[in-house]
Image (spheres, rainbow, N blue to C red):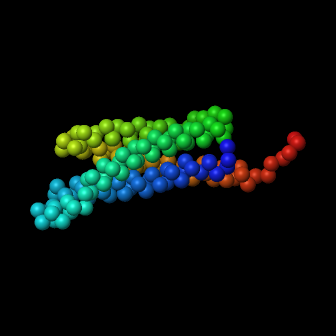
Amino acid sequence: MPFALNFVHPVLMWVLLGLMLYSGYLGYKASMIRKVSAEERKAMLPLHFGQRHAQIGAVILGLILLGAAGGLAATFLKNGKLILGPHLFVGLGVAVLVIATASLGPSLQKGKDWARGLHVAINGGVLLLFGWQAITGIGIVQKLLDSAAAPTTIGT
């Protein structure tokens, strides 16, 4: 496997973290529309915060699944096995939670308050876990870089 392919997963995950934060901002702005005066609401509605939040959510769902599969594949191709550890298990948990929060979409569109609360809670957990993943991922990338810089011995 070409060495550069080892970095597709980490770069994608950092892009995803940024997308998640932006989506959270859009979701927050969409929720504010329900709480502001009629005049403020009239000014905010053309900005389509809720629609943009849902669209980015769909992109996040797809990318998180591709990123998880890509991370598993890259690890297997590099090592000939999966490395069982916290980074793997938390990553799989994040993927499951993203699927769970996406499944709330129909209830959210119907305005169900319980779905909104659950959506916010799950995504708060996703952000915490994904932030932890980003930090532990830096250590993994550093190991990759160190292994590339280490001299190899030929003929031993």
Give residue 25's position: percent from left, percent from top. 32, 58
Give residue 94's position: percent from left, percent from top. 43, 41
Q: Seen in the image, is 21 located left or right of residue 136?
A: left
Quarter holding the N terminus is top right
16 vs 42: above or below: above
Res. 86 visible in picture: no
Q: Seen in the image, is 116 located left or right of residue 5?
A: left
Q: Quick one: which residue is furthest to the left in this view?
A: 38
Quarter holding the C terminus is top right
Give residue 81's position: percent from left, percent from top. 64, 33
Q: Seen in the image, is 4 located left or right of residue 50?
A: right
Nearer to me, 64 or 48: 48
37 vs 138: above or below: below
Q: Quick one: which residue is furthest to the right in this view?
A: 155
48 vs 107: above or below: below
Residue at 30%, 49% (x, y): give it: 54
Picture quadrant of residue 125: top left
Residue at 64%, 51% (x, y): give it: 4
Res. 43 visible in picture: yes
Give residue 132's position: percent from left, percent from top. 48, 49
Residue at 41%, 54% (x, y): give it: 19
Nearer to me, 145 or 86: 145
Residue at 54%, 42% (x, y): give it: 70
